[in-house]
Image (cartoon, rainbow, N blue to C red):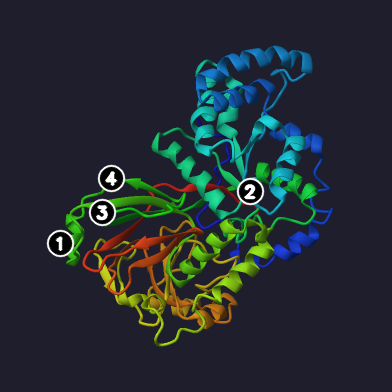
Amino acid sequence: MEAAGDDVHTPHSAPSTASSARVSIWESVRACGLWGKDVDKAELRRRVVMPLYARRAVAAAVKEKSEAAGVPAAAAAKEEEVVEGEGEEGLAVVTPMVVFVNSKSGGRHGPELKLRLHELISKEQVFDLSDVKPSDFICYGLGCLERLAERGDNCAKDIRGKLRIMVAGGDGTVGWVLGCLQDLNKLKREPVPPTGIIPLGTGNDLARSFGWGGSFPFGWRSAVKRYLSKAGTSPIVHLDSWQAVITMPEGQIDELPHALKKVEPADHLEFNKENGSNLPEKASSYKGVFYNYLSIGMDAQVAYGFHHLRNEKPYLAQGPVANKMIYAGYSCTQGWFCTPCTASPQLRGLRNILRLYIKRANCSEWEQIQMPSSVRSLVILNLKNYSSGRHPWGDLKPDYLEKRGFVEAHPDDGLVEIFGLKEGWHASFVLAELINAKHIAQVAAIKLEMRGGEWDRAYVQMDGEPWKQPLIQDQSTTVEINKVPYHSRMINGDP
């Protein structure tokens, strides 16, 4: 099934991140009762609401976790449609939409936003991620529409082909939904619905990168209409995603983040032979996908501490502003700004534990890159936006790009940028955009090898989900990063 005329992607067509990252405060002020007033509620419903029988069928299939359960639900609802005046005849399906809401995001706004969405579209088209996993909707909800289409239901076929998804949440929530949508590519169940964002998180870097703003508007009740209206009419662009495979000596990662799943170990003989590594014969492997960044070092340690503090004392985290204040305060307690000579080796440079191998664009050979001794945080970045809309890679001049062998960075160019942060003062100047980060490489694939030595752990985070990675002195832990062979489809909120 193909969605007629909606795939209008052109290379590097995402909005300017430099402008979108700096307008979140203005958007919030502008949204105070004004933004969205020009969107007619009745017209919005006409464009995005599915026929009663279709949304009842999808809801039943998801609830029962059976695509077949939607068929009798559709038949029963069709009888009601005649009474309610929602019959199929004369009804044009324009841009049907489903919204996933993380009701735990956005301070206290999540539950209220869900109720507002019920008013604007329909209850059956809004899914609370506390109750419904996106994988269940994709498996059973979309499966139900596909089954109805196979039975000759042209309206269901049209809905499946034109469906768009909005995610109300932070970067982690958006990544969760995008990861589940990737299964459609693997199963060749196309088209994959494109995704837009209502920013409810702390950083909202994915939302910034695709023109949806960096914060939830003050006048959000009116602004929600505008979000939905834009999602139905804006063009579709592409986003690279990157798979990280972690192989470690037999054992496990405690407090496994949602971003990682345990998998069967792969064959590492080739890597052993090429790089002289001492990888364990018996190993545990984990796999995950990131869309924005993966980092190792001090920034991940601060994130890990912040997440634990927020989980232990949730009353402290009442919204993005409070989260950022806590985060900033916590970073000052972790030794990033002032590390005495006698401090733990865990607070020193990553060079002590890390070896970095890369493949450059259009190159099949692995190349080892020497880690700068001053780097205490290594970041692998897919988007320009990082840490609430900052641009640590910078807007580089053509002469510098040519000298370093770099190209201008884009979210769909098949490359990631690797940069380093030194002590906290250096990171502060970088994130204030007074200087650029320490550029290390721009690559198409990465292998990291870590050994403990005096370190018994490293801190890692992937799209804001941190964990503590166990290390052993005599055996290597590896992280291999490669591009996923298909793009994620995003709705460009700022065309």
Going by the image, does 345 lie left or right of 121?
left
Say whether disc 2 or disc 1 marks the residue closer to the N-terminus.
2
Report which residue position mark 4 lands on.
Answer: 264
Query: How far is mark 4 from mark 2, CA to CA?
Result: 33 Å
Instruction: Tell me the distance, in whole angstroms, between the alpha carbons under discs 3 and 4.
Output: 12 Å
Q: Are marks 1 and 4 in contact (CB under 8 Å)?
A: no
Query: Cβ–Cβ below 8 Å for labels 3 and 1?
Result: no
Which residue is disc 3 drawn over? 250
| Discs 2/1, front | 2
Q: Which mark is residue 104?
A: 2
Upstream in the sequence, badge 4 or badge 2? 2
- Return the mark for residue 273: 1
Which mark is first along the chain, 2 or 3?
A: 2
Q: Based on the displayed image, in which of its 4 quarters is residue 85 positioned?
A: top right
Q: Amino acid at mark 1?
A: Lys
Answer few, some or many: residues within 10 Å of disc 1's Cα (few below 14, many 20 plus, some between 14 and 19).
Answer: few
**x%, y% of residue 436?**
51, 78
**Left of 300 or right of it: where is 262?**
left
Q: Closer to us: mark 3 or mark 4?
A: 3
Residue at image point 69% right, 54% down: 107
Of label 3 and label 1, which has the lower sequence position?
A: 3
Q: Nearer the viewer, residue 41 or 313?
A: 313
Dot 1 or dot 4, earlier in sequence: 4
Q: Residues within 10 Å of mark 4 (few under 14, many from 20)?
A: few
Q: Amino acid at mark 4?
A: Glu
Dot 3 falls on a residue whose secondary structure is loop
**Element carrying mark 4:** loop
Q: Residues within 10 Å of mark 2 (few under 14, many from 20)?
A: some
